[in-house]
Image (tube, grey):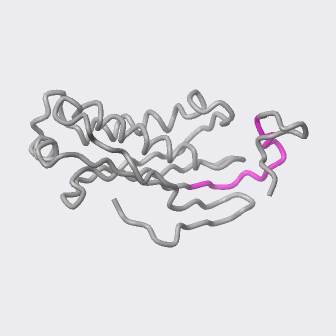
Amino acid sequence: MALSHLDQDGRARMVDVGDKAVTTRVASAEGEIRMSAEAFRLVADQAVAKGDVLTVAQVAGTLAAKRTAELIPLCHPIGLDHVAVETRLDETLPGVRVRGTVRAVGRTGVEMEALTAVAVALLTVYDMVKAADRAMELGAIRLVEKTGGKSGTWRRSATSEP
């Protein structure tokens, strides 16, 4: 399979989407951040000095989805119709799970926007909680599902809900 972001000489390029069909595009991604039991308790009790970790992470993820083209060089700027970032405490990690879902009507997919939303939401959790636990680990950031466009629907076979 040829990579669409490379020209005939192997140089990076932005893909021309001008001839693609305009369809509704939806993508969902997920990820997690693991932390110490003490840091988890601080987040759960809303006792982190910087404020409400889960709400700030949701807002940060939403903002990041809208600015993906400014962060990822070959992404197209897309007018997003909807961004939903869900954060959930998970005592089994212990830590926070994040799911981001993005929808747009356009000529290119929104997978990168969903992944960026999740990554930045997790980084925001790290930033807000690092005083309590610098050893936190971000992980399992992955696309869960995408619909729309020429390639249709794709779903990860074994997903976990945040």
Residue 150 sits in which quadrant?
Answer: bottom right
Residue 19 highlighted magenta (yes or no): yes
Residue 13 sits in which quadrant?
Answer: top right
Give the magenta part as a residue range. 14-26
Where does residue 54 sit, x and y in percent of width and height?
25, 42
Q: Answer with left or right where residue 111 lies relative to residue 94.
A: right
Q: On the rendered image, what quadrant is the N terminus found in?
A: bottom right
Where does residue 115 sit, x and y in percent of width and height?
50, 46
Give the camera-side residue of 8 and 81.
8
Residue 146 lies, with reference to residue 64, above or below; the image says: below
Residue 86 highlighted magenta (yes or no): no
Q: Answer with left or right where residue 51 lies relative to residue 78.
A: left
Determine the residue positioned at 50% across, 47% down. Answer: 114
Total marks in image: 0
Tell me which secondary structure the magenta stretch mostly adopts: loop
Determine the residue positioned at 45% across, 51% down. Answer: 141
Where does residue 84 sit, x and y in percent of width and height?
41, 48
Give the camera-side residue of 101 and 11.
11
Determine the residue located farthest toward the front in the rendered image. 135
Give the camera-side residue of 140 and 27.
140
Determine the residue located farthest toward the bottom in the rendered image. 157
Determine the residue positioned at 55% across, 67% down. Answer: 155
Q: On the rendered image, what quadrant is the C terminus found in?
A: bottom left
